[in-house]
Image (cartoon, rainbow, N blue to C red):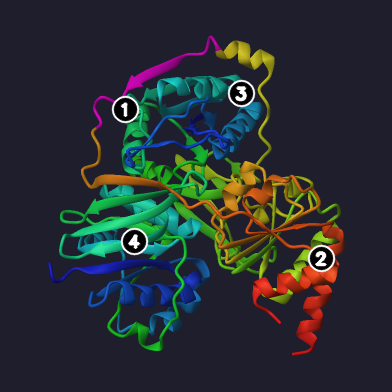
Amino acid sequence: MSNKYILIIVTMNNYHKESQLISFLKQKVPHKEIRILSIMSGNDLYENTSNKIQCYENTTLISSVKEIESLIVNAYFIVGIHSPIIEEIVSYLAGKFGLSIFNKCSDFQYICDESKIYVYKNICGGRVEAEVVLSLSERPVFITLYNVECDCYSSNTDSVSCFYIDYSLIYNQKIKLISDYKSNHQKLELNDTKIVIAGGRGIQEKKDFELLEEIANCLNGAVAASRPAVDEGKASTEQQVGQTGKTIQPDFYFAIGISGAPQHIFGMRNSKTIIAINIDPNAQIFKYADYGIIADCKKIIPKFLQELKNSNNSL
Amino acid sequence: MQIIVCVKPVFNTKENIIIKNSNCILPPQNDYMINPFDEYAIEEALKIKDKNADTNILSVSYGEEKAESVVRFALALGVDRAVFTINTKQYFSIDSLRTAKILYDAIKNESFDCILMGKESSDLQNGAVGPILAAMLNIPIVTNVHHCIFTDDRVEVERYSSNCILQKLYVDLPCIITVTKGINIPRLATLKGIMSARNKPVLKLSEANFTDDYQISPVKYSYKKSRLDCQFISGDEKQIVSQIKDILGIK
């Protein structure tokens, strides 16, 4: 039992998250060895490998699926921070080795003495929380966490063994990565930002959406949109929040000109503080918001932006 | 081309979720609806069929008896035939591994070029069934795809992998692709489609052979806390903006 460890799965694009996850685990489950399985692809593999890998004491290249199996079955559990590719790989590995998998969990509790893990996950559009108890006595489980907030401390990488593997190897070379690059569309990942400024149908014109962009920049936040705004071409699909878009939980969510249809609420309901601006006092959004402003967003937005610029200038 | 589409019946968005005894979610009182992301998968299959008339589309679903309406809906859109494994326990499943095993059992004797499905369901939101199924079938999978082009022996796909990183990949067939919004605009069912759906074959299977995963026990469900009443902010524009800044904690 004592030669087991917690395995974390990362992709090199997420290096800062990797440090956060290690810090998070060291606080949450102290005194357990941590090992890293790093999935590398494309540019990472050939350019950045030596730089990133050098941080770790022991690094091993994995060149067969059998070696992955050995790494996985000897872990207490396997954890990653959610992203589409992490979810895909983690779920695939869970399927390959017949293990349970829970993605986008909000938290977990590992009870070492009982060899059990409690996993917490929001389901049904954030309306219900599921608490699942899994036995780890015979097999590990995979979990991905929605996000971790943790300050990183620098001596993170001491005594952490890192194993790395080419993405294609997982799929027996049947997938070829042609290119990957950081898209210009969205400067900040919606899942990552603390402040999200979302616009809906109530924002009449695309140029008014651009004002939201400027507000977001002042606040170091990101712009999101409801489905009608995306369908009308005022925002991109990547910015859509809702049932067919993203589900996010920022600290602050501004719902501007958004009526509050269930499909949209689905994607932002668990934001910590929701501020709604809508000209219609009967808009559904006010049932879900913490703060409501009944006003014409066309008047509030420019004023808000002006005030933010003044604040920035006076610093 | 032979395409399989996984279609999940889910709770309607407006439906009230009812939890019984803290450990079970009751089936919906109203009709099920089709998982929104699966609609994009069906449309993607139909687009291929539009170009190649000898494409055959099979849909596979797992749900309560009452969810057959969703299976018929897929047939009405243009899917050719369906397999429907009926869930007799009438409970909401959080076990993706088990669901994947059930779907695997339903399609293991089928030949196919590609399996399409939505990237995740709107109720469980786990996104794991596709990748698990791919592992069981020993075929590759790419998730979260918003653009794909099929050629004879492979698919060329585009998707966001993480942190705004856009990937372009080539995947050998047979494979699984899970799709997201933006890949297409789903068509509506026509009256002709609805009528012809009645005569299309639906093979019904039972889930009798599948036991619960011994690893998971038990599950506890609880409602997320609802918010307190909304606090309305009033005043002129200057005052409103000033109060917003207070809420954000900025001077």
Cβ–Cβ under 8 Å for marks 3 and 2? no
- Residue B128 x, y percent position in the rendering: 41, 47
Residue reaching furthest to the left? A1
Q: Which residue is mark 4?
A: A108
In the image, what residue occupies the spot 52% across and 71% down?
A: A43
Q: Residues within 10 Å of mark 4 (few under 14, many from 20)?
A: some
Where the N terminus of chain A falls, by quadrant?
A: bottom left
Q: Which residue is mark 1?
A: B89
Which residues are drawn in magenta? B198-210
- Asked if one can make out residue A171 in the rendered structure from this viewpoint, the answer is no
Chain-order first, disc 2 or disc 1 = 1
Which numbered marker is on residue B77? 3
**Secondary element type, mark 3:** helix
Q: CA distance from mark 4 to mark 1?
A: 28 Å
Which numbered marker is on residue B235? 2
Cβ–Cβ under 8 Å for marks 4 and 1? no
Q: Amino acid at mark 2?
A: Gly
Q: Quadrant of residue A302?
A: bottom right
In the displayed structure, A153 sits above or below A10; it is below
In the displayed structure, A51 sits above or below A148; it is below
Is residue B30 part of the magenta span, yes or no?
Answer: no
**Secondary element type, mark 1:** loop
Q: CA distance from mark 4 to mark 2?
A: 44 Å
Q: Amino acid at mark 1?
A: Lys
